[in-house]
Amino acid sequence: MEAGKTKVISVLVENKPGVLHGVANLFRRRNFNIDSITVGLSEQPNTSRMTITVNGDQKTIEQVVKQLAKLIDVLTVEELEQGNFVMRELALIKVNVPTPKERSDIINCVDVFRGRVIDVSTDSLTVEITGTPDKIDAFLNLMKTFGVIELARTGITALARGSKSIRIDE
Amino acid sequence: MAKMSGAQALLESLERQNANVIFGILGGAILPVYDALCTYPNIRHILARHEQGAAHAAEGYARASGRVGVCMATSGPGATNLVTGIANAYMDSSPVVALTGQVPSSGVNTSYMIGRDAFQEADIVGITTPITKYNFQPRTVAEIPTVVNTAFYIASTGRPGPVLIDLPKNVQAQTAEVEVTDRIEARGYKSMIEMDLTKISEAVNLLTNAERPIILSGGGVIISNASDELMQMSDLLIAPVATTFMGKGSFPEGHPLSVGSIGMHGNPAANKLLGEADVLLAVGTRFSDRATANLDTFCPNAKKIHIDIDEAEIGKNVEVDVPIIGDAKTALKLLFTALTDKLHKTEDTRWSKRVKEAKEQLSPLLKDRPKDLVPKALLTELRKLLPENAIVTTEVGQNQMWSALYFQALKPRTFISSGGLGTMGFGFPAAIGAKVACPDRPVVDIAGDGSFIMTEQELACSVTEKIPVTVIVLNNSVLGMVAQWQRMLYKRRYMAVNLGKTPDFVKLAEAYGAQGFRATSIEEFQKAVKTALNSKVTTVIDVPIGSEEDVVPFVPPGCGLPQQRGDY
């Protein structure tokens, strides 16, 4: 991930219909660029956590945070501090396997990257790999030499390091 | 708890919010609410002739009174016709609650349900997401009171704005045990954040040391009812007050320290002085592009203090030195208290002299008075004919910018215009709404022929509902402002601006049962206005003007405020 350009924003939102639309709409309308967005339940009831990666300068990121905070279904917004958070992305990659030799080459790579083979057929392998987007990019580049049949990436999800938490006070 | 229908729950809740006027048009998907209205005589329904008119009328009502305006429409086209009005209220931060019918969310005939492209179905919640503060689609009868309370709360607090409630027809019709409560549910909504007092003291330091302070007052001052505090502040600092277009009326324009409104078609005195000031105190403004013009030359020599209730406005368009996030009235009070002990200014400082001189040299009002019934003469004359508390609305285009330049607004909430969205057709229905809110005060719409035609059908509403307003049509048979741009910026290549045969507005008024006059001289105009003000029926005054009349001076697009040009 390019340092200083892509920022990660953690957002707690109401878990109800239309919220994702509202957030996505805001980005489109205000001309902000989303690199990725992930949504799922959080530890709190009726509350989902969105992890949004945004591309832009500091002024843009500030506007993103302020405009998000204005949305009524947004409960808290925080820009995760560079270097002070953990993030992971998951990718599923279906790789072409022309010969048995290549099958073992691929499996070796998967081991090095601490991925897992989750499906096997006569002429393909499906690999699950988790890590930072950089790591996934690197693995993906290796796989391209064999031939990538299909790719699905989740986009990153992230949390602040340590006991610090972004939550809402009831 | 009481057993009632969704429609009743809605109307009970509206009554509880003291919302006793609804501007609307009915249709199939809102019929249960209209049926229930028969038994709520305290709620006045005003039948508009187009939903856009209903939405603008609700906004005119809101802006004249400071209360929430309510409009209502059916699903599909009824709802989409509200969209322009909702967008307008959003841009100008007006508290409006829009109610729409929706096809059923469940029921017996499943082909006629949300998501199945039913007859007159439109995703109005999706459509209005970017132009409302919030919107709701209640799916149960029981939640309606809380939804209504929350809608009114969100619409009217913080930075106000429109909120939409989309009511599926089955929810209106079903009955359930309902508790009509005062409950509000919006845990993610903060109407206000706590004011940072260190910023107040930073502002005090800047203002205490200022030699050439200027105040820029925006629409937020009017919304916050902070005109008295603004006046106090100006007196204390002996600072000239410029307003944005939306701030017009927040400071009496006849006051010696008033320098008029800034902007593309602003008062040259205001534009000039802004460039000379060393400290800018901007209150309740979002620094719109039409106000600031090119940002590189906007108020370049001044340290800037920015008071706004919306944190996202800080640094959005203009970088400021001291941001104060909070309500304009509260912030000005705090500033005033902190400043009074420190500041001992005496009149006739060099800055006050400069302000006086700039006004004398540059103010378009103080320049010669034409004898013919040209826009400038008409608008200065109109000011004399109207009492201080009369409400003026405008349409959009030349009529609006002439009004900004030549019509002095003297009190807050007496100048109502579509500033942000620039909606032609806004002024007339907004005037109707304002008149409903303030029936004892004269309401005048300053219109152009192009704009008036866009919502002229509301003459039927104003006549039938006995809401007498006065429309002054500056009739030049062209779409004047764009014609001016084509003249000035596109080498006079006119395209699609000529309106050709415009209707005879006198006959048009009469056809609707209103009265119409034509004025071609100042005397005729005076007579027509006086008659209109004493009439119990809506009056249209047609004023033919030259088709090549410009609004000058103006700042060409891309230029800065100092590059204002044109003889005036």
Image (cartoon, rainbow, N blue to C red):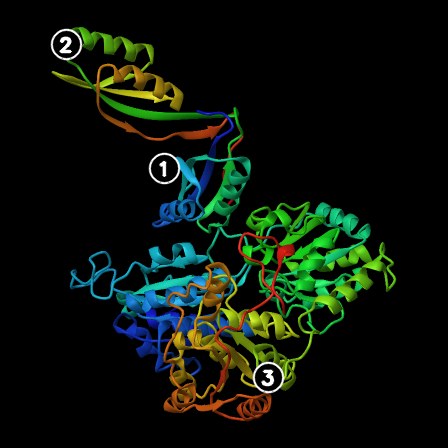
Nearer to me, B32 or B81: B81
Q: Which quadrant, please, contains the N terminus of chain B?
A: bottom left
Label 2 and label 3 in one chain: no
User: Which tag is nearer the camera, tag 2 or tag 3?
Assistant: 3
Q: Residues within 10 Å of mark 1 (few under 14, many from 20)?
A: some
In the picture of the structure, the residue carrying the numbered disc 3 is: B372
* Marks 1, 3: nearer the viewer: 3
Q: Are marks 1 and 3 on the same chain?
A: no
Query: Is B542 on the left-hand or right-hand side of B166?
Result: right
Query: In this rendering, is residue B517 above or below A59?
Result: below
Chain on which label 2 sits: A
Residue carrying label 1: A40
Q: Residue B390: x, y in percent? A: 60, 81
Q: Which residue is found at the position 30% from the left and 78% from the top?
A: B35
Q: Secondary structure at mark 1?
A: strand
In the image shown, does A19 or B539 lie closer to the viewer? B539
Q: Amino acid at mark 3?
A: Asp
User: Cα distance, mark 2 to mark 1?
Assistant: 40 Å
Most foreground residue, A25 or A47? A25
| Mark 2, residue position | A99
Q: Amino acid at mark 2?
A: Thr
Whole-percent x and y of residue B125?
Answer: 35, 58
Q: Is residue B50 visible?
A: yes
